[in-house]
Image (cartoon, rainbow, N blue to C red):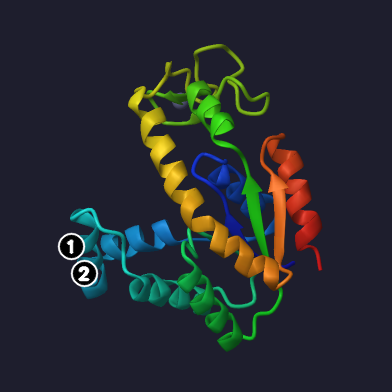
Amino acid sequence: MKNIILIAPPGAGKGTISNYLVEHYGYVHVATGDLLRCEIAMNSELGQEIDQIISKGYLAPDDIVIKLVLKKLEQIHNKPFILDGFPRTLKQAEVLQEIFLQFHLNNITAVYLDVDVDTVLKRIEGRRICNQCQKVYNIYSEELKPIHEGLCDNCGGVLVKRSDDEKEKMKIRFQIFKENVESILNFYQSRNELQVIPATTSITDIVDKIINEAEV
Ligand SMILES: [Zn+2]
């Protein structure tokens, strides 16, 4: 299996798709957000440094994120991985390429989950969360809607909708993502490593398309 660099706008269903690939295809999910949170939780010297930066509202600097990604790649060596949340800039994509060279990794596919902002906003509109176990549903998705309307399949808890300002925040995040992603997509396109997959169909359909590309 090829290693996957998963690039997707916020709300494209990246988490759900990553989980599916981990459970069904033996991928290791390398999410930079998780790596940062994990380092903070360990309360290491680096973790404290990260905590100070993030708590002020800044993004973690490149060198720290790269350090964590490197450490993780060393730990999981030989297992196929999904890289999630990195690279976010062209500079990061270039550094990542050097890291891959260092690890003799050349079986890479960059997968871009293509979705427009209106589709993402509709998904947010349909999202429901269990007020007991926090399981996430979507009433507009055949695969993600609850068996009984308004109730959690797992625990029978009540499904609630998050506040409306989420849509406004999403519009801004989506816009910022779009501004940065173009140069990253061009980078992988020029290396013949880019696969654009529409993220508007069902999860299993999207996963099938990714696996088609990832099978060596
Ligand atoms: Zn529940």
Question: Foreground: 205 or 177?
Answer: 177
Point out residue 20 in the picture as x, y percentages from the top left corner: 64, 47
142 shown above or below 2:
above
* Res 212 seen here: yes
Point out residue 167 in the picture as x, y percentages from the top left corner: 41, 29
Q: Residues within 10 Å of mark 1 (few under 14, many from 20)?
A: few
Q: Check if mark 1's residue and mark 2's residue have beta carbons within 8 Å.
A: yes
Q: Secondary structure at mark 1?
A: helix
Question: Foreground: 21 or 49?
Answer: 49
Residue denoted by label 1: 52
Which quadrant holds the C terminus? Answer: bottom right
Point out residue 28 in the picture as x, y percentages from the top left corner: 58, 62
Question: Foreground: 157 or 83?
Answer: 83
107 shown above or below 163:
below
Point out which mark residue 209 bears.
none
Say what amino acid the circle numbered 1 marks.
Answer: Gln
Q: Residues under labels 1 and 2: Cα distance?
A: 5 Å
Q: Secondary structure at mark 2?
A: helix
Q: Residue at x 42, y 49 (%)?
A: 176
Residue denoted by label 2: 49
Question: Foreground: 106 or 168?
Answer: 168
64 shown above or below 17:
below
Q: Residue at x 42, y 31 (%)?
A: 134
Q: Residues within 10 Å of mark 2 (few under 14, many from 20)?
A: some
Q: Residue at x 57, y 41 (%)?
A: 13
User: Could you say which quadrant of the image residue 166 lies in?
Assistant: top left
- Ligand 1 is within 8 Å of the C-beta of the residue at disc 2: no
